[in-house]
Image (spheres, grey):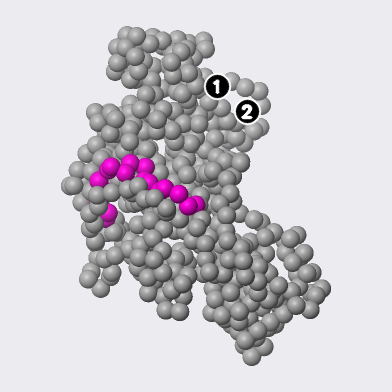
Amino acid sequence: MHEAARNFQSASEPEGDSKGHGTHTSSIVAGREVVGASYFGLAEGTATGGVPGARIVVYKVCWSSRYSSVDILAGFDDAIADEVDVISMSIGSRFPRQYFEDLIAIGSFHAMRKGILTSASARNSRPFPSTVNNFAPWIQNVAGLSINSFDLNGKSFPLIWGGGVVNYYAGADTTISKFCFPSALNSHKVKEKIVLCEITHDGHDILIANATILIANGVGTIMVYSSIKDFAFSYFLPATVINTKDGLKVLDYIKSIENPIATILVGKTWKDVMAPYVVSFSSRGPNPITPDILKLDLTAPGVDILAAWSPIAPPTIDSEDNRSVCYTSGLSKWFNNVKFNIISSTSMSCPNASGATAYVKAIHPNWSLATIKSALMTTDLEYAYGFGHINPLKAVDPGLVCERFVADYINFLCKQDNSSFCNTTPRAWDLNYPSFSLAVEDVTNVGSPNSTYIQHPHVLSFSAIGEKKSFTMKVYGQNIAQQSIILGAVTWSDGVHALRIRSPLVVYSETTIR
């Protein structure tokens, strides 16, 4: 990985990666091959980025105290001036904004005009409708997809229940201490023990409970949560998460004998036999501003991704974890020399897709942004999945693509603003996007010169590469209005690219997107 860095903030802010996020995502795109990579023995093997021969420039535009619009747009300006090929952005706004008010949409539009494709994360807003982020049609947005040792290994410790070690001096009682809230536990009784903690909420409370045991000099946690997630966190101490049914069994065990114990064993890496599937934290479509433009675009691996970690960043992503990986006193045996970390987020999915984009760009340097994006979208495997799991090997030879130009996006924006400067007011669905909400679509042949594609009952015949054809599709069905979402797909075949040229079709009611 050939790397340069640029910083958009005052000297009072650290120039290095103090959170680890940027190091992790950039190494996913273009990290060099590293043999023996692991996180405390987990996921041990050879790590490499998507395009390890690529050159990257890192623009630090986000800070611990704030996210500045000026800094983000300055990053776009410099990336455009540096004439990069792909911009990978694992950031997004909290709420959807109109295109004219969305700084990432604005910055990426200017990048698109200069021939630069922006790949951005879809956000981690859980599986609720219209939570997708970075949905401008010139942005390639990416959802998260599941994919297929330490000194205490094998040692046993006393096992206690958080509800039984109350810190009464802090005004706590069992109803509070069982959740392992800060100051709720008697630290003298927690020292050198594994604690069973109940969890009230998702994510943040899990990390707080684990940190509470750390502060009280405990050695590990068993955390009971009613809904086991399909992704994991990095914790302060050894930890496991179990469901409520199993939690009751552990609690019964603690209460049934005089000296209950638990044993810490080395973690193992398990393959998910259900993968690939869209993970629960990943945001869903449809597009909250322009539902006629189907979003999500792509899915890429975003669960339990092993990648490089900053030497000055804490080992967890919790905002309250201020420890440095290299300089943590008293915990050096745990966190010293951590060069990799395992993280789950659409922030990890985005650079995986960015790497695939760079790969296709390297094979076809003369292809337009729309051609590359269309190739990725129509060759991979509904609202959650978009066009499916990225497959860059197939994307280099897609057969048909949907081409778009700057003028097409300007016409699209005219519809959004009803601008008086536009000669016409086109419909949003007139944009030649490789998905269907309504009927008209153009395709461009980038396969063999003499090709015929069959879409029953229509046939598209091409005599040259670059030739364009149009087709019209109508959707009929019984009781369509009574169903909230109907999913389908249109697939073209020329006998060579069979089952590769696929565009999803979604029919929905107005209430679905409200």
Circle number at residue 475: 1
Q: Residue lying at the far right in this picture: please name it.
A: 256
Tell me what residue is drawn at x 53 percent, y 69 percent.
151
Q: Earlier in the sequence, mark 1 or mark 2?
A: 1
The secondary structure type at the circle numbered 2 is helix
Residue type highlighted by circle 1: Val
The secondary structure type at the circle numbered 1 is loop
Whether the magenta-drawn stretch holds residue 53 is answered as yes
Q: Quadrant of residue 250?
A: bottom right
Q: Quadrant of residue 21?
A: bottom left
Label 1: how many Cα within 10 Å (few below 14, some 14–19, many 20+) = few
Residue type highlighted by circle 2: Ile
Tell me what residue is drawn at x 66 percent, y 32 percent.
482
Q: Is residue 286 above or below residue 104?
A: above
Whether the magenta-drawn stretch holds residue 132 is answered as no
The residue tagged 2 is 480
Question: Can residue 445 be seen at all in this image of the molecule?
Answer: yes
Tell me what residue is drawn at x 62 percent, y 86 percent.
188
Q: Residue 402's spot in the image, x, y percent?
A: 37, 25
Q: Residue 91's spot in the image, x, y percent?
A: 38, 53
Q: Is residue 386 above or below residue 248?
A: above
Magenta span covers which residues?
43-59
| Callout 1 touching callout 2 (CB < 8 Å) | yes
In this view, the residue in front, 434 or 45, is 45
Q: CA distance from mark 1 to mark 2?
A: 10 Å
Q: Residue 352's spot in the image, x, y percent?
A: 40, 44
In screen coordinates, is 196 left or right of 277? right
